[in-house]
Structure formats: structure tokens, C-alpha cells
Image (cartoon, grey):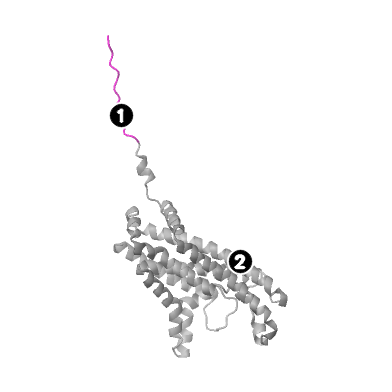
Amino acid sequence: MSTTAPTHTALPPRDRGAFRGKVTQARVARSEWTKLWSLRSTRWSLVAAVFAMVVIAIGIAAVQMNRWNTLSLHDRTTFDSIDNGVGGYHLAQLAIGVLGVLVISGEYSTGMIRSSMMAVPRRLPVLWAKLGVFSAVTFVTMLVSTAIAFFAVQAIVTQHHVQHGIGDPHALRAVIGTALFLTVVGALGMGLGALVRNTAGGIAAFVGLLFVLPGITALLPASVGDSVNPYLPLNAGFTVTTSTFEDPHHLSTWGGFAVFCAYTVVVIAVAAVRMVRRDA
């Protein structure tokens, strides 16, 4: 008597591919990390920013010390090695801001942004991932660079006993504040790049907002300029990096930085709304 082997209905295999392909903020951030470091502009811009923070600050301090005896009494009494130690941000902010624009405007220029939006249909996780990854890289890089510059400058100026320790008033705040300021500068550049969606236009908007606008307000009557200037983006942001204020018309240290952050948040918010409502 023959027996028939029982037949078993094959169960469908687990759809592992769907699980692996699930879009999460962490996976989007990992993708943006890869894209960030695949750009040559990232390396060159960060190198330029580090050079500005470290080499230029050291060079200026060395020159000042070599000509110390020829400086006026006013220049010697007002010399601040804390501001000198973090002063490289004046040039570094341009490199960081331009890189912020390029990080997102480059994808619009090449059309790669369409692939990103197809992979992440909700769109905004792409913007948050770009912003988070770039801000983290900027903050860590600039904090290390600023700390190196600060301690190197203090070592140079000891020959004339005008050095400061990291524990002195305003010193630690200036070092951390400079890194925070440059991080927000990069975020502002990225927001402008996402808003304008064009590299040249984004850089022009960044330069105009931060560097041209103060020159325009300088043409205003002094009474008006003194009231407006503290609230300009760059002047407000500078407060967190500065140890000694030359201009009496300025916002408080963290109050000014909060105003600068508010400008950045507004730009990013408008860029986010435009990203959701308009096709790439």
C-alpha cells in the first residue's frame, strides 16, 4: 500500500528587502555623511577654514610680538590675546558659509537632488540629515582648530606677558562660542543654498547678507546706524566670539548669538517649506 507524502504549502519568504530598505533618519544621515565626504569641496573648504583659524592667528600674533616695542601705548594696553587667539574666524566664516551653500546647491546643479527625493519621498529628512551632519562636522573641526589656535597664540605672547589662560574670564566662552558661531554660519549658508537652489545665487545671498549689508547700514546717520547695526546677522553673531567690544553699541553675548540663530532658523524654515511645496 503506497502512502502519499503530505504536501506542504510553501510559505512566502520574509520580505527582508523591505525591512532593509526602510527609510529612517539614521540611514538618511549615513547617506548624507557619505555624500559630504565624496565632495572635494568639503576637504578643501575645511582645510581653508582650519588654515584661517590656526595659521593666520599664529602669524598675526607672531608679527605683533616682533613689533611690540614699536606699538603705541594704546595698542599695547588694548591688546587682547583672547581675541587674537580666535580671530581667524573672520576668514574661516567665508569658507564655512560657502561650503554650506555648496553642500546642497551642488545637488540641485547636477540633478542629484532628484535621486535623493525619490529615495526619501518625504523630503524633509534629507534637509535635516544634511543640516545635522554638516553642523556636527563643522562644530568638531572648528572647536579643535580654535583650541589649537588659542593655546598656540598664548604660547607666543608669553614673551611680553600678555597671555591668558583658558580659565580666565571670557576665554573658554570665546573658544566654544567661535565654534558655535561658525557652525551656525554653515547652517545659514546651507539654508540659503536650499532656498535659492543655485550655487552662485546662494553664495551671493550669503555674502550680501553677512558682509554687504553692514556696509550699507554704515551709510545711514549715526543715530539710526547705532540702533540697527547690533541686530544685523553678522554683528549679532560676533558677540559670542568676542572678548573685548570696541563698539559700545552691541547686544549681550548670548542675546546677540540668539538673534543670529533666529535669522538662521527663519531661513531654514522657509527653505524647508519651499522644499516640500516645490519639485526639485
The answer to whether one can see residue 164 in this image is no
Q: CA distance from mark 2 to mark 1?
A: 64 Å
Q: Earlier in the sequence, mark 2 or mark 1?
A: 1
**As displayed, is residue 12 above or below residue 270?**
above
Residue type at the position of mark 1: Ala
Magenta residues: mostly which secondary structure? loop
Which residue, as the protein is rendered here, is positioned at the far top?
A: 1
* Residue 88 x %, y %: 56, 73
Q: Identify residue for label 1.
A: 10
Q: Which mark is residue 147?
A: 2
Q: Secondary structure at mark 1?
A: loop
The answer to whether one can see residue 58 in this image is yes
**As displayed, is residue 176 above or below residue 12?**
below
Quadrant placement of the C terminus = bottom left
Q: Which mark is residue 98?
A: none
The residue nearer to you, when weighing 190 against 106, is 106
* Residue 97 x %, y %: 46, 70
* Residue 203 x %, y %: 41, 72
Residues packed near mark 2 inside 10 Å, few (<14), some (14 to 19) or many (20 plus): many
